[in-house]
Amino acid sequence: MNPAPPAPPPLAPPGAGPFMDHTLVAAFLGNVPDHVYFKDLGSRFIALSASMVHLFGKSAAAEIIGRTDFDFFDEAHARPAFEDEQRIIRTGEPILGKLEKETWPDGRVTWVHTSKMPLRSGDGDIIGTFGISKDVTGAKETEMALEKSQKELVIASRMAGRAEIATGVLHNVGNVLNSLNVSTNVLGTGLKELKADSLTRLGDLLREHAADLGDFLTHDAKGRLVPAFIETLARNFTEDRARMLQEIESLRKNVDHIKEIVAMQQSYATMAGATEAMAATELMEDALRMNSAALVRHEIRVTREFAAVPPLLAERGKVLQILVNLISNAKYAASDGSQAVKSVTLRIAPGEPGRVRLSVEDNGVGILPANLPRIFQHGFTTKANGHGFGLHSSASAAREMNGFLTVHSGGPGTGATFCLDLPAAPPPVAVPA
């Protein structure tokens, strides 16, 4: 019979419990990056992490212990925080994952995700509260800035009458704005790094020797370096000027691209609801143009395989809405994939008799077989930040035009192909001579 395994060693030396408890708590409070705090029944601080001491601008926890949020925040934040803690003390129910806005006496605003829980004694009695807050100011400010930009763009799109494909347009304009932001940052950095101070110092030096300038430039050790220094400075200014002009040209092109997107969408919006014969190639190229900035930014190679097909019979706005969404999704899938060369292939080919097929294929992340039947369901998405409306609305729009949208994927890592089948316009009726 096998001998019994040896007993595991004790977690702590006998009798070292209180010492070990103190050591663990001190190590935790001294090193945890988030803001951890403990409060008594009156919502007064009784212990807090070093990160929170630093947040309050103090050098030691002793400067904070015994005080309340009212000593550090304005009424708008301190009062709700106090009421939350008193509610926890009364009910024993925690508050988890609450987003809080903190306004400081100097007017500074920060945001935290906070969770607060009842603090209990060894007998289970509530003796206060404790909580942990994670600073999310940067993420919140970015979110608010994006929301503001999106609202402004939505207003602009409504004024322009771009309701049919507003989502695709706003997304693409946002991508172009990212490029504009990069160019403005490059210009700002370049201006800051201009060697204007060197030119000022040179001017001061020459002014000091105005009375003996010729002798200074000829015989003085510093003076003899001036011509070479001026030459170097001129070369630097010339190079900086060339770089800035290049960025300004990039800015101009991106602004023109935004104008082009808006003008294109306006032309489609005026045709909303009208079924007509149209060239499939023209629609695919317009949808590609609306995604062009994002495709370039993500370094996606685009291949066109356009066969000769009869005109489509559909609504321009709806077809463009579908294609913009499919190309955008393909771009994300290819970008997130593991292939060395990220690619999207656009195809136009005859479908079943009397129909035309437009396909968007990527070599990206692929789709799980279990997800294929659900891919067009409302609210279903495989993207972390997706909302699940795009493909559902695209499938609905296809059905409204007597068409259908399908998808194929061999599984993860194999890419995916979305196919839009639409009716072909009937051939023109010959008029007897």
Image (cartoon, rainbow, N blue to C red):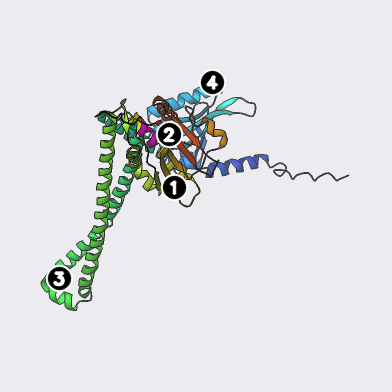
Work out how far the residue at label 1 is from the one at label 2, CA to CA, in angstroms: 19 Å
Give the residue type that dot 2 points to: Leu
What residue does disc 4 label?
A: 90
The residue mark sitting in front, 1 or 3, is: 1
Work out how far the residue at label 4 is from the one at label 3, CA to CA, in angstroms: 82 Å
What residue span does the magenta drawing correspond to? Answer: 318-324
Give the residue type that dot 1 points to: Ser
Q: Give coordinates of residue 182: x percent, y percent.
A: 32, 48
What residue does disc 2 label?
A: 420
The residue mark sitting in front, 1 or 2, is: 2
The residue sitting at the front extreme is: 433
Give the residue type that dot 3 points to: His
**Residue 191 is inside the magenta segment:** no
User: Secondary structure of the magenta portion, mostly?
Assistant: helix
Label annotation for residue 343: 1
The residue sitting at the bottom extreme is: 219
Dot 3 falls on a residue whose secondary structure is loop
Closer to the N terminus: mark 1 or mark 2? 1
94 or 82: which is nearer to us?
Answer: 94
Q: Residue at point 64% right, 29% down?
A: 122
What residue does disc 3 label?
A: 209
Picture quarter containing residue 307?
Answer: top left
347 or 386: which is nearer to us?
Answer: 347
- Are discs 1 and 2 less than 8 Å apart at CB? no
The residue sitting at the left extreme is: 211
273 or 427: which is nearer to us?
Answer: 427
Where is 119 relative to 22, above or below? above
Dot 1 falls on a residue whose secondary structure is strand
